[in-house]
Amino acid sequence: MGIFQKCADFTKVVDGVKEKGIYPYFHHLESRQDVVVIMEGKRRIMLGSNNYLGLTTHPEVVEAAIKAVEKYGTGCSGSRFLNGTLDLHIQLEEELAEFVGKEAACTFPSGFQTNLGIISSLAGRHDYILIDRENHASIYDGCRLSFGKIIRYKHDDMEDLERCLEKLQPDDGKLIITDGVFSMSGDICSLPKIVELARKYNAAVMVDDAHGFGVLGDGGRGTANHFGLTAETDIIMSTFSKSLASLGGFMAADKYVVEYVKHNSRPFIFAASIPPASCAAALAALRVIKKNPEIVSRLSDLSRYMRNGLKERGIPLRESKYTTPIIPFYTYELETTLIKAKEIYEAGVYLNPVLEPAAPEGKCLLRISLMATHTYELLDEAMDIIDSVINEKSRTVVALK
């Protein structure tokens, strides 16, 4: 079968999992992305969305997207480099740069593509990219697409990062890249120490704030703002598909860095621009956040409530120094994790399994992610269902209808 043999072998494994009835992926929604959804014909509490501020259904965001389609049509039919730039793109970039505290910003068609575009354009043959082992896959792929030399350091281990930096020459080009909030664990990076080491060893710092933008910092300005290190963080990137309730991504940095990336990034130059509706939705969501910073505080309060409630119910949480809306708990073995995910799903709660290799062997997780629009009553209901399944209690949990 040649090149397709691996496809056949993989599909046999997937089919086996499906036959057991514990395949966890591609459940389909029949409603809006909200705190409660209709998924495969049944009402379920959504604890698996990255819609952190709940803005996908906000009236101002929805209206902005509709009006953009009416004014600009459904697509831009070209690259930003040529005919694909709208005044909306420019407005969004200017407001994003101002919001995160940088000179300039540049938008990309997706968050994944943002990392591909930044890293591949900046890192050359004589440069080194130092990345946290638990960084997002898009960072790894951006590194592979570049000509830079990749060095991985242990997760949030600053001693290991320094050991890596010590081996390099002072004049070597060096870029340290870290997630702001790590997507699987909810950990927050040790940015103060990273910045300290970067200055000591003449390195630049880039933060992937996909899960920190809208979640941390003053009014949701992100991880760098949270630590008071916006100026010291050379590049901030994030996505629109989480707190900004849309699709796309952006980088923010000094103007000369942004200009270089815009003129040298293949994922930017050779891709169609963000469609009008997505651009307008992200811009409207950003303006909602600026007008209503209290939603960021509410998300933090709900996250703390959920983490404490799960602890009280004896759920084995992965410990974290910080409270974020990402709350993983251990289910350990792979098959056990799939079975528990299915039981929780059938009882009326959707959450996400974290399996090998995203989790170490024997330390698989189920991952909760919260929205600012959840209610305490919904969280109580969901926690009772999770408690019943994980702790196998005999009390009856009423299935959601």
Image: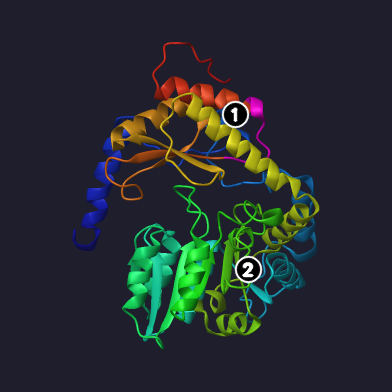
Image-quadrant location for residue 41: top right
Task: Give the x, y percent position of residue 193.
Answer: 48, 65
Q: Say whether residue 375 is magenta.
A: yes
The quarter of the image holding the N terminus is: bottom left
Q: Is residue 400 above or below residue 31?
A: above
Mark 1 near mark 2, Cβ–Cβ under 8 Å? no
Q: Say whether residue 313 is magenta.
A: no
Q: Is residue 208 above or below residue 202?
A: above
The quarter of the image holding the C terminus is: top right
Q: Main secondary structure of the magenta part?
A: loop
Mark 1 element type: helix
Task: Give the x, y percent position of residue 44.
Answer: 56, 29
Q: Which mark is residue 379?
A: 1
> In the image, which residues are magenta?
370-377
Q: Which mark is residue 230?
A: 2
> In the image as oriented, which residue stretches furthest toward the bottom?
171
